[in-house]
Amino acid sequence: MSQDDTRNTPNDDHLTDDTADVEVMPIDAEQVADYLGKNPDFFMSHPALLEVMSVPHNAGKAVSLVERQTSLLRERNRQLTLHMGDLIDIARHNDSQFEKTKRMVLALLDSATLDDVAVALEESLCRDFYGDATSLVLFADQPLNVNNLTMIPRSTAGVVESLIKTNLPTCGQLQLVENRFLFGDEANEVHSAAVVPLVKGDAIGLLAIGSHDPYYFQRSQGTLFLSYVGEVLSRVVSRILHEEPA
């Protein structure tokens, strides 16, 4: 190897060892002040720092308007940050609800019989939506009671008439007679529920989801996804009822 080649060859040991041995010295307040004095435009290129800094403005015993305005702006920024975090959490929750609802809807659309519908509801509502009990009540002349699927004449559903007439989902704690009508032997364990009327022209049934937690379903909660499921289920059930032989 020539002398020039030796001079131009990088010394890898030197590069690694020297940088590893460098000791980072702490910076004191005087060094910070000295640096800012030499760089007066520092905060022009780093404006975000001003939002978290406290810079008192000497106005004697009176509160400086500048200081007061800065304090208000900083508090407003904090509130907006918290609000943005809440919106992001809501968006994530809604995205999760949409995915669960989509899986349920696809399962319902694939259902060819009422038994398929009952199984799809049971699996989705108990697995994805953490329901403890489900009940599907359909209004038909031929009585039927199998697992969580019940078919009864419309005239025998008087105790849940108020839930039917709303045409909208109802959430919260039900009356004892409503609980027993919808959940039968499981009624004593169901302490809150969501009830969705099924409507296709006229009322054709009710979907009920029960929880052992008295606060799981509350009257103040949103019912957008429940309404959507109710609309899809109404169409699927109506189609199957008209296709099945009497």
Image (tube, rainbow, N blue to C red):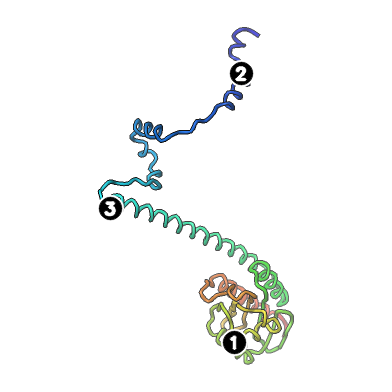
Identify residue for label 3: 63
Q: Quadrant of residue 145?
A: bottom right
Q: Which part of the image, by quadrant, shows the N terminus?
A: top right
Query: Mark 3 belongs to which amino acid?
Result: Val
Question: Which numbered disc, 2 or 1, marks the residue closer to the eye?
Answer: 2
Query: Mark 1 belongs to which amino acid?
Result: Val
Residue at the image position 59 percent from the left and 11 percent from the top? 7
Identify residue for label 2: 11
Residue at the image position 53 percent from the left and 79 percent from the top? 168
Determine the secondary structure under disc 2.
loop
Question: Which numbered disc, 3 or 1, marks the residue closer to the eye?
Answer: 3
The image shows residue 223, relative to residue 51, as above or below, that is below
Q: Going from the N terminus, do you reach mark 2 or mark 1 first?
A: 2
Residue 141 position in % (x across, y down): 68, 89
Residue at the image position 72 percent from the left and 76 percent from the top? 113
The image shows residue 82, relative to residue 193, as above or below, that is above
Question: What is the tally of numbered marks visible in this picture?
Answer: 3
Residue 128 position in % (x across, y down): 65, 66
Identify residue for label 1: 160
Residue 241 position in % (x across, y down): 67, 81
Foreground of the two, 223 or 41: 41
Give the farthest residue toward the top.
3
Q: CA distance from mark 2 to mark 3?
A: 62 Å
Residue at the image position 55 percent from the left and 79 percent from the top? 170
